[in-house]
Image: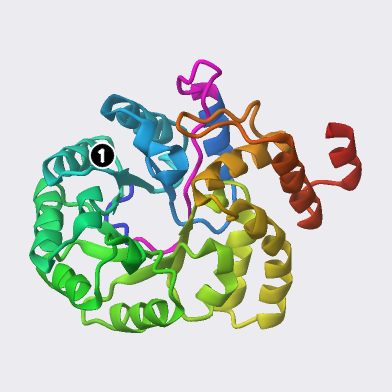
């Protein structure tokens, strides 16, 4: 049972990282500290786990349940927890949804099924979300991928899903297309039953937020939750000068975190937390591999440019 009943996904929601030990097991002590560090930030509305940022594709069902247990124990009393639903099939997705509700999650972030890369119909998308909604009463966040991947939902499909499944309360928008993104902000947030748009366009966050998103859900919030919360609040106040100042600090980190290949984005965030002294090591599970020295140096330089690491500390650590 959730400790945060009637939660509607909105505002600033960092997606935390999952530290691993050298033997690739979950580093529970490191994870607890990371959760506590992020949750101590003012201005957050929730925390997301079992998502891209926690390398959910490499985690078993039992590991995902343990991640939720740790998160509930560490921060569940302070903040709602959004639990990812990563599954290729609807039956497994429903199983994860039931587990998450029983474990006290307050909302679910539903990833698109991988088979949709081969093509989808509106009926398939609606059926997938109905299966999940039948398994849980929790509010659902639709993860909207770029349409070019085959896993994104066209406008009419998205509207049919929302009509058929009343527990869809938000989308995590990764459309990657400014006109589509703006259309979704305007269309979904003005529905009779509004659906919040949570941007995950972290590589161009200020540009996205000024379009009117009602929140953001981002893996880079695992490193800069304070800057993201301050930026969101500045945009909400229409304080463009402060928003641009904050964006100038965020930009160097966005540049290095979201470089090609994108699969390494959370790998880079782990290295950033090591450089900041917030994680003891940056271990990722295969097929990801340890970053090279040159890339770690670029991350160090971005932390200095963002004002998160002093030039002296960076030289001493080099």
Quadrant housing the C terminus: top right
Report how many numbered discs are placed on residues in the image: 1
Q: Position of residue 97 (x, y in %)?
A: 20, 43
Task: Judge whether residue 225 is colored magenta.
Answer: no
Q: At which x and y percent is residue 86?
A: 28, 43
Question: The magenta stretch spans which residues?
Answer: 9-29
- Residue named by callout 1: 100
The answer to whether residue 311 is left or right of residue 2 is: right
Q: Residue at x 73, y 68 (%)?
A: 248
Give above or below for 76 relative to 59: below
Q: Residues within 10 Å of mark 1 (few under 14, many from 20)?
A: many
Q: Position of residue 207 (x, y in %)?
A: 56, 76
Relative height, residue 282 to residue 140 (above, below): above
At x 89%, y 46%, the residue is 311
Report the side of 50 relative to 162 (left or right): right
Front-most of residues 292 and 222: 292
Instruction: Please give left or right for residue 117 compared with residue 247 in the image.
Output: left
Asked if residue 12 shows in the view, the reply is no
Secondary structure that dominates the magenta span? loop
Locate residue 166, reporting x and y percent: 15, 66
Q: Residue furthest top?
A: 23
Residue 25, located in which quarter of the rendered image? top left
Magenta stretch contains residue 25: yes
Residue drawn 18% across and 70% down? 162
**Quarter residue 171 falls in:** bottom left
Which secondary structure lies at badge 1?
Answer: helix
Residue 79 visible, this orientation? yes
Question: Does residue 135 sit above or below 74 in this rendering?
Answer: below
Q: Residue at x 54, y 20 (%)?
A: 21
């Amino acid at each position: 049972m959730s400790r945060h009943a009637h939660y509607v996904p909105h505002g600033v929601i960092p997606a935390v990282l999952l530290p691993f030990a050298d033997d690739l097991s979950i580093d529970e002590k490191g994870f607890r500290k990371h959760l506590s560090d992020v949750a101590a930030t003012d201005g957050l509305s929730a925390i997301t786990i079992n998502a891209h940022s926690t390398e959910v594709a490499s985690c078993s069902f039992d590991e995902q349940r343990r991640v939720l247990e740790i998160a509930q124990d560490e921060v569940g009393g302070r903040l709602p927890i959004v639990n990812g639903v990563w599954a290729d099939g609807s039956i497994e997705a429903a199983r994860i949804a039931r587990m998450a509700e029983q474990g006290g999650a307050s909302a679910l972030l539903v990833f698109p099924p991988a088979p949709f890369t081969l093509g989808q119909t509106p009926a398939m998308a609606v059926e997938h979300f109905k299966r999940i909604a039948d398994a849980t009463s929790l509010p659902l966040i639709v993860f909207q991928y770029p349409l070019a991947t085959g896993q994104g939902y066209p406008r009419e499909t998205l509207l049919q899903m929302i009509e058929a499944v009343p527990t869809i309360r938000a989308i995590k928008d990764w459309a990657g297309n400014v006109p589509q993104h703006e259309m979704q902000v305007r269309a979904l947030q003005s529905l009779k039953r509004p659906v919040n748009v949570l941007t995950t366009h972290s590589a161009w966050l200020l540009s996205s937020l000024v379009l009117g998103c009602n929140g953001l859900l981002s893996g880079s919030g695992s490193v800069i939750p304070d800057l993201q919360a301050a930026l969101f609040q500045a945009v909400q106040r229409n304080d463009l000068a402060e928003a641009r100042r904050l964006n100038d600090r965020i930009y160097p980190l966005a540049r290095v975190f979201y470089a090609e290949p994108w699969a390494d984005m959370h790998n880079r965030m782990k290295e950033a937390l090591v450089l900041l002294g917030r994680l003891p090591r940056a271990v990722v599970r295969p097929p990801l591999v340890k970053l090279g020295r040159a890339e770690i140096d670029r991350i160090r330089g971005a932390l200095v440019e963002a004002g998160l690491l002093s030039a002296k500390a960076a030289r001493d650590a080099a």
